[in-house]
Image (cartoon, rainbow, N blue to C red):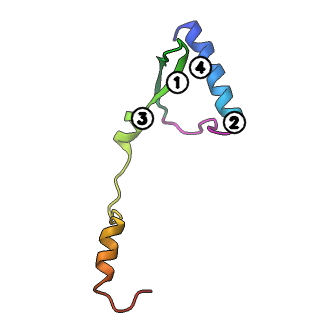
Amino acid sequence: MRFPEDTELKKQLKVYIDAGNIEPARSLIGDDFLFAKNRNETQRLCIDYHAIKNITQKDKYPIHRTDEMFCMLIFYQYVA
């Protein structure tokens, strides 16, 4: 990483950590990140989550949509 981006990264990470939005990672898996220029020439931190998305396991029993669940309740006499 180039030196100006390195200082910008450290500055933005410190702001997010101090605000409590993020915390230092303890995981072995990390994400790629990049900077995108805003209209006012400042840099915005963007995180690429494709690496985590590829290893995330899908739910084996997905939750139904709420409108489908209410339609199913019509046929039940007792609901616990």
- Disc with the residue nearer the chain's start (2 vs 4): 4
Q: For numbered disc 4, what is the local secondary structure? A: helix
- Disc with the residue nearer the chain's start (4 vs 3): 4
Residue at label 2?
A: 19
Q: Is residue 66 left or right of residue 28?
A: left
Of tags 2 and 4, the one toward the viewer is 2
Q: Amino acid at mark 4?
A: Leu
The stretch drawn in magenta includes residue 65: no
Q: Is residue 74 left or right of residue 17?
A: left
Do tag 2 and tag 1 residues touch (Cβ < 8 Å)?
no
- Mark 2–mark 4 distance (CA, rounded to whole Å): 15 Å
- Disc with the residue nearer the chain's start (2 vs 1): 2
Residue at label 1?
A: 45
Residue 9 disc label: 4
Q: Quadrant of residue 25?
A: top right
Residue 49 disc label: 3
